[in-house]
Each structure stands twice: as C-alpha cells, then as structure tokens.
Image: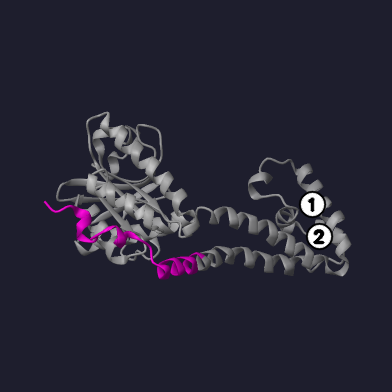
Amino acid sequence: MKKPYLSHLKSAKDLETTYEAVRAGFVSLALEKNRRATPFVSEARALKIAAGKAKKPMDLLRIKDIQSAMLTAAGVSDKASKHLQDSDKRDAIIGLIDNFLDPAGDSFVEELVFRFLLTRGDTLGGSMRNIGGFMAQKKLTRAIIANLKLSGRNCKWFHNETKSWSDFPMDDTDVELFLRGLNWESDNGPRTIYYNVTPFWGNNVDIVVLNCNAAKLNRDTIHSPSAYIALGELKGGIDPAGADEHWKTARTALDRIIDAFGEHKLKPHIFFVGAVIETKMATEIWKMLKKGDLENAANLTDEYQLTSLSSWICSL
C-alpha cells in the first residue's frame, strides 16, 4: 500500500520552504497585523475628537466616556485594570495628567492619543506572538473544509467563542476565524477534528482527529486512548530564524505522542505541518516518514501538499 506522504512528496527537498514562500508569509503577517490594528486606530480617532472638548488636561477628568481610554493611556492594560480599585484608576489617570499631559501644553490631546496607542500597541504585539499558529490553523482548516465540501459531506462546527456545535452555514466566509472543531460522518464512522487538545498524558497537541460525533466530544473521550484516529503538530511561524526552535518543540511533542500511545500498544496516524522548513529540518522529517514515526507531513506554504494532506485527513 502506497504511503500517504508519497502522494505529494518525492524527497526531503520537497518539504523545504522557498524564499518566495517566506516573503509571501511575511507580507501576510503584515496584512494581518494591520487588520488587527484597525480597531485601535478607530478608537484613537474617537478619543481625539472626544478629548478635544477639554480646554486643559484636568478637564479630561470630567469627560466620563473617555476615562477607560485615559487609563489605557496611563499604561494600564485592560487585564490589569480589572484588579484595580476605582481610586487606584483615578490616581493612575491623575499621574498621566501631571507627568505627561500638563507638560505637553497645548498639545496635550495629541500626547494623550499617542500614549493610548502606545499601550494598545503592546496589546497588539502580545497577540501577534501567537499569530503564526492562528494563521496556520486558519489555512489548514480552510483546506479541510474544501475537501469535505467537495465530497458532499455535511458538517457541524464548534464555535470557539460561543462554545457550541452547530450545522455548517451555507455562507462559510471567515468561519475559520472562530472555528475550533469540525465534525462529519466519514465512510469509516464519525470523525471530529479538534484543535489545541490536552489528551490523557497532559501535554497540548495542536490538532487531533477523534472517532466520535460532536455530541460525544467530552472529557472522557479526550482522555480515552482508543478514541484517537490521528494527531498532528502544526507550526505556522514563517521566520527562518525561528525554524529550529519550532521544530525542537514540535519534535518533542511528536515523541511524546508516540511514547504515550506506545504504552497502550496503540499507533494512531501522526503527522506534521510546518510553514518554514529548513534543509536540516526537512531531512529529519523525511527520515521520520521513512521510518514510520510520522505517517504524513506537508509544507503549509505549498498548496498542493496542503490539499493532499487535508484529503488524507478527511479519508481516515
């Protein structure tokens, strides 16, 4: 029987990420960063207009609707503000006025807006540290959905914010932004894909395929070794400088998966998908494929490889 990875890979070289793909990946990250920054820029514009009603910095304290934004400008994050008393918040805002807005003179409104954006920028930077994984999950999800739709299979999907399953919508535009799970009926039985799972051995796995329907996806199923059809690691970072570190993390996770199921004398399908794969890393992945430690692998930036791997996942 032909090994599944041979459908889209001929050698380790095929796994390597091209310069063009790296460049396109950085552009995609920049566009995503700008998309996520848009709400902050809109808030800053609204703050400038509202604060413009003040004659002097202390007048800002009388504008009720901007107090939250002023707290942000004082350097207090949304998360930190939840732990502060009202008196602490007011002290922080007065400190902002005394130390930065008063010295700015007539430009105090611009100073307020700049400091608001500075704190919001830190918030954006924090969210961007996980953006590679988010974008990788989106891309793989869209490829899996495409395969399921082509085969005419009805799906349910799990909304990560509402924490509920529902029928897949006719208009599925941007559904991957909120999707954490997919469920369908395959020729081999019910199948559920779920992201970011902590199985029975206690370490996170990026993506799993379970032998269950949506209604039976619960803690008992997740902790049952026999429920697992496939498990995979998904690394979406596109910066070549971080490739080795991403692979070390992924390799450790894959080894844990192999060992955990080995103790139960089980061998589910194990796969790897990565956005930036350097030569040395590609060679190691190829060796794991040839040895059988990995059953499939694909470069996330190669549409043909991703489609082939997604089709394989849907056929399990």
- The amino acid pointed to by label 2 is Leu
What's the CA distance linking mark 1 and mark 2?
10 Å
> Is 99 part of what is drawn in magenta?
no
- Is residue 271 left or right of 161 when viewed as pictured? left
Which residue of the protein is positioned furthest toward the top in this rendering? 263
Q: Image point 30% across, 64% down: which residue?
A: 170
The residue beneath circle 2 is: 60
- The amino acid pointed to by label 1 is Ile
Marks 1, 2: nearer the viewer: 1
Q: Image point 47% across, 59% down: which residue?
A: 240
Q: Which mark is residue 123?
A: none
How dense is the environment of label 2, judged by Cα within 10 Å: few (below 14), some, or many (20 and up)?
A: many
Residue 171 can be seen in this image: yes
> Is 13 part of what is drawn in magenta?
yes
Q: Which quadrant of the structure image shows residue 217?
A: top left
Circle 1/circle 2 CB separation < 8 Å: yes
Specify the principal SS of the magenta part. Answer: helix
Which residue of the protein is positioned furthest toward the left in this rendering? 1
Picture coordinates of residue 269 (x, y %)?
Answer: 24, 44
Q: Nearer the viewer, residue 285 or 311?
A: 285
Picture coordinates of residue 224 (x, y %)?
Answer: 28, 32
Which region of the structure is painted magenta? 1-29
Sequence-earlier tag: 1 or 2:
2
> Is label 2 in a helix, a strand or a loop?
helix
Q: Image point 15% across, 47% down: which residue?
A: 188
The residue beneath circle 1 is: 93
Q: Which quadrant of the structure image shows residue 307?
A: bottom left
Picture coordinates of residue 49 (x, y %)?
Answer: 73, 69
In the image, is residue 60 above or below residue 86?
A: below
In the image, is residue 37 above or below residue 190?
A: below
> Is label 1 in a helix, a strand or a loop?
helix
